[in-house]
Amino acid sequence: MKELENYLDNLGEQKFQEENKIVVVHNPVVNKIIEQYEIWLAKERVRFGLCIDCYNHAKDLIKEIPFSAKDVKDFSFAMKNYEKEYSFGKSAYFLSASVNSSKETDFEIVTYHLNKKLDQLGFVNKKNIKISGDTGNYAGAHMLGGSLIVEGNASHMLGGDLHGGLLIVKGNAEGLFGLYTVDCLDNKDQKKMKCCFGENGGEIRVEGDLGARYLDDLFKAKVYVKNELVWPE
């Protein structure tokens, strides 16, 4: 947490408050992102599971905001204030929409200050993202390209339905799950996903330990654990 305080002190646009609250005081762009995020959180209370509509809803809300990669990083710090919100766990959809909507290519998302892990970080990613901290389930889900580098640990279902790009976990990963949409094609959102995305592929590298693996011959991505190729076998 000391690193977080130092960052905010040097930033000159934010200040660290008591009870781990971060208040944006001089950044109108981040304030505007937060306004739209609050609208998004309220709407997404009623959606469950894998949800491309959650992602598209976020894209619609932020499409008129001229934000930078720095704004996305600052916003990720401010998300600490919303951990008690019912829809907070799905906030990676909002972050992914922000990253993919930006004209910039290199991003950092900070998670080490959060008590709750974010699922689906890197959803349909096409950019280069560094996660400073841990991720929840489905990190790199449906990645299309670019890179996702997790500086900490990843939870279950790593790289679900990866379609392209490079996914690196520098810590441990609890589990890797290849194609979790194959058996769910009757679901409306899943049908959209399969139509939008092409053949799966890419590369996954776990530098620490990897737990359970759920893979089959349909999963074409290469998987390395501690620099050793473990898939395809």
Image (cartoon, grey):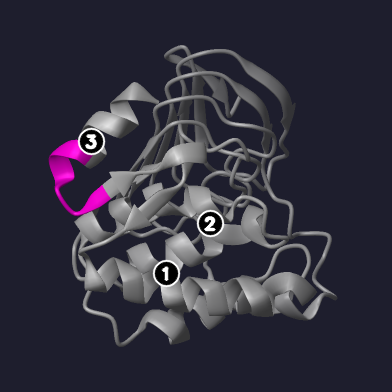
Element marked by disc 1: helix
Q: Which mark is residue 92?
A: 2
Task: Using the rendered image of the protein, determine whether residue 108 is visible from the camera's viewpoint.
Answer: no
Disc 1 designates what residue?
Answer: 34
User: Which contiguous range is marked in magenta?
Assistant: 9-14
- Could you tell me which residue is drawn at 25 percent across and 41 percent down? 8
Q: With 136 as the anchor, is 60 left or right in this view?
A: left
Disc 3 designates what residue?
Answer: 7
- Marks 2 and 3: which is nearer the front? 3
Q: Residues within 10 Å of mark 3 (few under 14, many from 20)?
A: some
Three-letter residue code for mark 3: Tyr
Is 191 or 148 nearer to us in this picture? 148
- Could you tell me which residue is drawn at 63 percent across and 40 percent down? 116
- Dot 2 or dot 3, earlier in sequence: 3
- Could you tell me which residue is drawn at 55 percent across and 82 percent down? 57
Q: Residues within 10 Å of mark 2 (few under 14, many from 20)?
A: many
Three-letter residue code for mark 2: Ala
- Could you tell me which residue is drawn at 52 percent across and 67 percent down? 198
Three-letter residue code for mark 1: Ile
Element marked by disc 3: helix
